[in-house]
Amino acid sequence: MNIYVGNLPYNVTDDELREAFGSYGEVVSINVIKDKFSGESRGFGFVEMSNDDEAQSAIDGLNGSEFGGRNLKVNQARPREDRSNRGGGGGGGRRSW
């Protein structure tokens, strides 16, 4: 199960998240989302766990809990939406005066 973790402290490390979630079961991967320009954490990330029951226990146990001075928001991650056919958009172009 892929788990969304929000309201993370900006200085959180993958190892700290692995330790927090690892107490509930096997952690497959950790991905703290970072700003592509500054390299700083954006305050959220994803944790993948191999067992759905363990993942649900982690969600139940960690959602709302204090971590690094902040209250975590933890829930099952939703699949990414397909951004290729959002409709609308375009933009840019030249103006002729």
Image: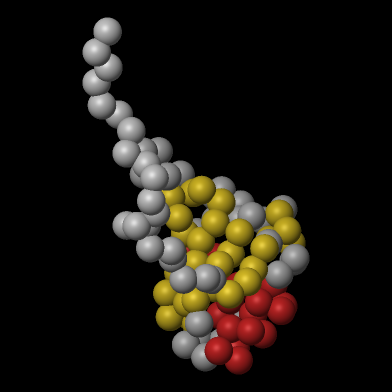
Q: Quadrant of residue 30?
A: bottom left
Q: Is residue 63 left or right of residue 79?
A: right
Q: Nearer the viewer, residue 83 or 89?
A: 89
Q: Nearer the viewer, residue 6 or 91?
A: 91
Rendered position, 4 above or below 25: above
Rendered position, 37 above or below 43: above
Q: How is the image coloured?
A: secondary structure
Locate residue 89, reporting x and y percent.
37, 42
Which residue of the protein is positioned furthest toward the top in this rendering?
Answer: 97
Q: Nearer the viewer, residue 58 or 91?
A: 91
Locate residue 48, reporting x and y percent.
47, 77
Rendered position, 40 above or below 28: above
Locate residue 34, reporting x and y percent.
43, 50
Residue name at image x 72 percent, y 78 percent: 61
Q: Nearer the viewer, residue 21 or 96?
A: 96
Q: Quadrant of residue 97?
A: top left
Residue name at image x 43 percent, y 64 percent: 81
Rendered position, 25 above or below 31: below
Residue name at image x 61 percent, y 59 percent: 6
Res 47 visible: no
Locate residue 4, reporting x and y percent.
56, 67
Q: Is residue 37 left or right of residue 11?
A: left
Residue name at image x 63 percent, y 71 percent: 75
Instruction: Count numbered badges in the picture.
Output: 0
